[in-house]
Image (cartoon, rainbow, N blue to C red):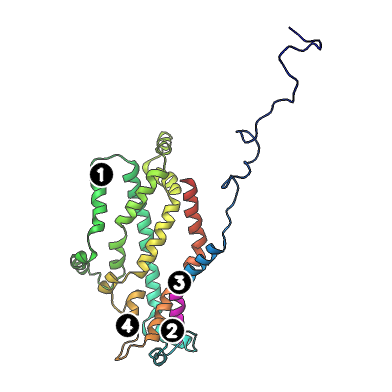
Amino acid sequence: MTTTTGRPAGRAKGPPRGPAKGRAGSKGPAKGRSGGAGRQLRAGPVTYAVLALFTAGSLFPLVWTAVTASRDNARLARTPPPFRFGDRLLTNLGTAWGEAHMGLALFNTVLVAGAVALGTVLFSTTAGFAFAKLRFRFRNVLLLTTVGTMMVPPQLSVVPLFMVIAELRWTNELQSVVLPTLVSAFGVFFMRQYLVEALPTELIEAARVDGASSLRVLWHVVFPVARPAMAVLGMLSFVQAWNDFFWPIIALTQENPTVQVALTGLGRGYVPDQAVIMAGALLGTLPLLLAFTLFGRQIVGGIMQGAVKG
């Protein structure tokens, strides 16, 4: 049945149909929704106030160390303590540099911390890859044993470790500080947990099909994927080795010290010179601040890259 105009009955004339707004395939994000694609959240005054408060709290110990290092011991003994910089900063820094052999201590600490960080990252990544993706007997038992060593206090291993170092005639040598800390249980567990999620098994199998050996898989597949976690572990290991005091004070002396050992020789006397001690602490802190200033952007970028990939 048709109408007089020739159109089929039951079909009304109207605008052509099109895609509904907000459906999949429509261009642009829907308006009025918070957290849409491409939308950036803006921080308010409360956020900036909280960040400023935490920044001030983080910088206060460093600023206080510098203020104390710029005064003399007599002024530090009076009440109230000084809150402004004095005129003895360079003098106290020079005294600390000479008394503690700070040049040799900084050089030794850079070598020790760099070697420990490099060894920890290399060995922990290799062991973490083995525990995460390889199949071998007693894998879970070995992993639990490795993690269980974190519960053993380091004071229990001091005597046997010192006996080994003395037998090897490594006392007062830097290798006595480096070798016992080249591998950490925390580093192995940290890299294992990261590689379980970040490294697809299919990627390893594809490399095996292409004829890659285990060493080539480790170098060309595992290390590029684990680079963000390796950067974090390297930074943590470097800072821990730089600030380590317990074992270096036993294995080393003031003749061949690290920074933390050298600081124990500052300000000696009936009345310890707190200004000189603070000046030495400032000298031992500045290299860490300089390293983070130079490489902080790369470290944070690696962390963010790993977060986006995850």
Camera-near label (2 vs 4) is 2
Q: Secondary structure at mark 3?
A: helix
What is the distance, in whole Å, between disc 3 and disc 2 at their CAs? 19 Å
Please tell me whether mark 1 sits on a helix, a strand or a loop. helix
Disc 2 + disc 4, Cβ < 8 Å: no
Numbered disc 2: secondary structure:
helix
Q: Amino acid at mark 1?
A: Asn
The answer to whether mark 1 and mark 4 are in CB contact below 8 A is: no
Reply above or below: 196 against 2. below
Q: Residues within 10 Å of mark 3 (few under 14, many from 20)?
A: few
Q: Which residue is mark 2?
A: 69
Amino acid type of the residue that numbered disc 4 sits on in the rendered structure: Gly
> Measuring 38% from the left and 90% from the top, which residue is drawn there?
77
Magenta segment main secondary structure: helix
What is the number of the mark on residue 41? Answer: none
| Residue 215 appears in the rendering | no
Label 4 residue SS? loop
- Inspect the magenta stretch and tell me whether residue 42 lies in it: no
Which image quarter holds the N terminus?
top right
Comes first in the chain, label 1 or label 3: 3
Q: Mark 2 and mark 3 in contact (Cβ < 8 Å)?
A: no
Q: Quadrant of residue 282?
A: bottom left
Mark 2 closeness class: few <14, some 14–19, many ≥20 residues within 10 Å: many
Q: Earlier in the sequence, mark 2 or mark 4?
A: 2
Contact (Cβ within 8 Å) of mark 1 with mark 3: no
Residue at 53% x, 63% y: name it: 46
